[in-house]
Amino acid sequence: MILRIGGVPLHVLREGSGPVCVLSGGLGCCWFDWDPVVPLLAPHRTVVRFDRPGFGLSAPLLVPPTAAGEADRILGVLDALGLNGPATVVGHSIAAFHVEAFARLHPGRTAGVVLVDGSVEEDPRPAPAVEWRTGAATLFARGLSAAALPYTLGPATRRLTVRMSRSRGGDPAPAGLVRRCYGTSRHLRAALLENARYLDVAAELAALRERAPLPPVPVTVLAADGGGRSHRQRRWLERQRALADTLGARFTTAAPAGHLVMLDHPAAVAEAVLAASAGPV
């Protein structure tokens, strides 16, 4: 379905029944990246997933993303669906910033928090020249779009990124669906803007942590463990564990799994969500 949230038509799906959980994907992800997880949750939970502006089947974004803005967007989706009680919010990668902000800004609407291989910035500070970066990202997107490059580069970039972000296997999404969602100028612009504003959103969340505590609900940090023992892999797991310590969260890993944990190890994601959700399993 398409719901107008904050003036932007968003593609929203609601499936299953029971206590509510919301699934929000990482930078550039679409609703179908959660497909392996939803059948494991829907018998026990009302599962809500949506495409942020510019991604999937949602309309282009109107303003650059912020942590508070994305938290309010999640709230708007729940309200538009008439789901007025607490929900477990699940954020993958950059969306971990968004769902943590939701919990801090809307504690009465939060039943639990699950961060799936969430983005971590240990000393976040806003990057300089925010307006310049925003404008440059927009102009770059326009230039590529004028050359009709998103139609060919978008799907190819998606396929390569998925392959590199998994411990095994390629992209399970149908080619036609990938082209429909990724071969567009709106997707390109949204991805460039989220990337351009990444450090600003991280710094905004760090400031929010100072003034808005998490509600007393279950919080889980689920980290991808590819099984390697490289310095980079060990460092990533250390950062994820440190995030869990900072938030007073339960720390667990999915193995073997790459960054796209929901594709590599959907059972681990579903288990974390069910454990953090209100109500009986």
Image: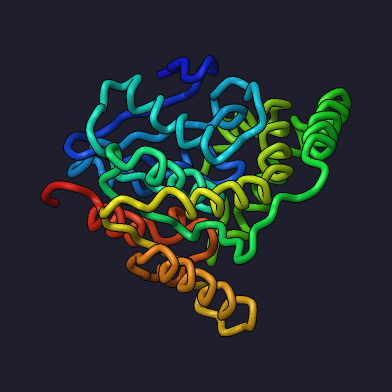
Q: Between residue 183 and residue 131, name the one nearer to us.
A: 131
Residue 255 visible to the viewer:
yes
In the depicted view, which residue is nearer to us: 277 or 148? Answer: 277
| In this rendering, position of residue 274 left or right of residue 251 | left
User: Residue 95 location, x and y as percent?
Assistant: 51, 46
Q: Residue furthest left?
A: 280
- The spot of residue 157 in percent (x, y) is 71, 46
Q: Is residue 8 above or below residue 272?
A: above
- Comparing 134 with 235, the one in front is 134
Q: Quadrant of the N terminus?
A: top left
- Which quadrant would residue 149 be assigned to in this image? top right
Q: Residue at x 52, y 42 (%)?
A: 173
Image quarter for residue 147?
Answer: top right
Name above or below for residue 260 compared with residue 75.
below
Instruction: Give the residue displayed 46% in from the left and 38% down from the top.
Output: 32
Q: Nearer the viewer, residue 48 or 70?
A: 70
Q: Residue at x 39, y 26 (%)?
A: 77
Q: Position of residue 11 (x, y in %)?
A: 47, 24
